[in-house]
Amino acid sequence: MDFLALAINYLILMSLGISLETLFSGFYIADRYFKFSDTGHYAHSEFELDIFDFIIVGAGSAGCVLANRLSARNYKVLLLEAGGNPFPLTLVPGLATKLLRNPNIDYGFMSAPQKHSFQSHKNNSYMIHRGKGLGGSSLLNFNMYMRGSPLDFEEWANMTGDDSWRYENVLKFFKKIENYQGYFPLDDVHGTDGPLHVESPVFFPMRDEWLQAGMEMGLRVKDPNGFQTESVFPVDTSTLRGTRVSTYRAYLHPVLGRRNLKVITYAQAQKIIFNDKNKVVAVSYSHDGKIHQVYIRDGTGPYSSTGSEVGALFSSSLASRTDWPAIYLTYWPYGVSKVFAIDQENLYLTRSGLLTKYMAADIGSDGFIVFIVLAKPKSFGELTLASANPNEHPIIDPNFLSHPDDIKVLLEGIQKSLKMTTQTNAFKKIGARLTNSSFPGCEKFVHLSAEYWDCYARNFCNSMYHPSGTCRMGRSSGDPGAVVDSQLRVLGTTGLRVIDASIMPQFLSHNKYITGTYYTAKLFSPAKYQLLLLE
């Protein structure tokens, strides 16, 4: 299937007035019927007994990489995915916010009501967008390509007692996945022979002003994917000539014809089956209204894989060292209109009319929103099962801003963003100013005071949609919070690993978590947990 040609045809259909909902519906009716990417219909003899060396549950950002690398080694691999093929318009990064919340490609989990944040949102909760379909959340993100700080990986190595996680050891994996054609020179931190194309956008509004403003504040223009310090930079993206490069496009689609790889879409995993020695022997899944069971060949095991263009990094007064930035700033340009305000209310589920009131005085203006990101939050939440039914959404409580230090760092970030966008010559030259409107619900506080910004942050906030750490790795003994060891093997079992962002023992220092202003979306983070099989 030529998805690029389909995307162009769909854009033409949209220009003729056909709605996204109609295009979504038609595509997925056809996809469920024809199962474009399923390789089960090849009926290769090696699949007849439904016995595999590896079963991968979930074709998300990690699952697509795993399927590629395992099948390259002639293992018999089964890839199960609850969703279908990527909707063709996911190739267009600029449509990302329009594609969210569609149940064909977005699970749309709702968080538990928050006590310390999201006070302007319906039920004090927010929607957690997670990708559904071949490519997972790499189909929905904004393609921002950032790795995190080298010190993050040093921290991981210390927490797990495994030196293989140190930055000097994972750097080769980063370089191996990249076909880097980005803004910065290659130096010794980038590669050019990998499947994931990375480039710098040809144009992004106010990029030059942003970089100049950062330099006025004493920041260097520096590659955020090298050794991070306080800096300002354009953000590279995982795109090819402006089109999305998901892990489906980079890793899975090129190898769908491999005879030892079987892909089944619309297959919802139901149960992992163990023998009396806690060793995985089979996986059951639902497909086409029936329950199927597939088996693991002895000696192997399944893998579980669920799957803005400029920035600036700052240290905070609470940081232990200045070369480990705790604040990340970026921005999003837009035209202020009543339609835009209503769209944002619907997208982020704020109370009806709230953003319309907030933006009313600025309608007709060109604007931009600065996102202040907590790179190293201290608040932690929890994920619990709602029931034993695998089809029921879990209870997700991120517990945002519950630690007092998080709001302190966030307020520091707000002040840095105000200085950068209202006090530098670069932004003064284009007439940039802060809105004079007070955020609804915070009018009782002196405008722009610390109390006002505290209220603002707790009311008008969002997540970076990069939850992690729910199956974190740690030491195999003496670490009660660990779920997997440093080789990502589930503790207390044999033949089962978890390979996705849930294993991260601590947050990576990039746009992992946002609050206080608005929303941007997930970048692809090609960390070692996705790349263990590249060696």
Image: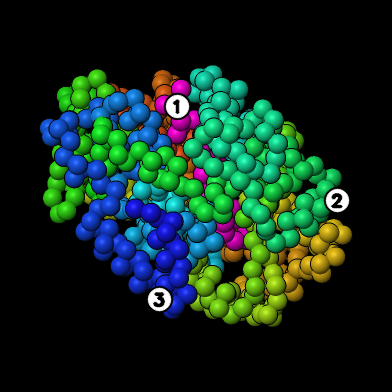
In contact (CB < 8 Å): disc 3 and disc 2:
no
Q: Main secondary structure of the magenta part?
A: loop
Q: Secondary structure at mark 3?
A: loop
Task: Indicate the amino acid at tag 1.
Answer: Leu
Rendered location of residue 374, percent (x, y) = 62, 48
In this view, the mark in front (3 or 2)? 3
Rendered location of residue 41, percent (x, y) = 18, 45
Which is nearer the N-term, disc 3 or disc 2?
3
Q: Secondary structure at mark 2?
A: helix
In this rendering, would 23 be left or right of 467? left
Please tell me which residue is depicted at 34% across the width and 25% down the height of the picture.
73
Q: Is residue 211 above or below residue 357?
A: above
Identify the image quadrant of residue 318. top right
Q: Is residue 143 above or below residue 428?
A: above
Task: Indicate the amino acid at tag 3.
Answer: Ile
The front one of 364 and 397 is: 364
- What mark, if any, has residue 356 been given in the picture? none
Residue 152 at least partly seen: no
- What mark, if any, has residue 216 been given in the picture? 2
Rendered location of residue 426, percent (x, y) = 83, 59
In this rendering, would 77 be left or right of 404? left
Identify the image quadrant of residue 77. top left
- What mark, if any, has residue 534 been given in the picture? 1
In contact (CB < 8 Å): disc 1 and disc 2:
no
Per the rendered image, the range of residues in magenta is 507-535
Q: Is residue 239 above or below residue 196?
A: below
Please tell me which residue is depicted at 75% across the width and 68% down the height of the picture.
434
Rendered location of residue 325, percent (x, y) = 69, 40
The residue at which mark 3 appears reads as: 18
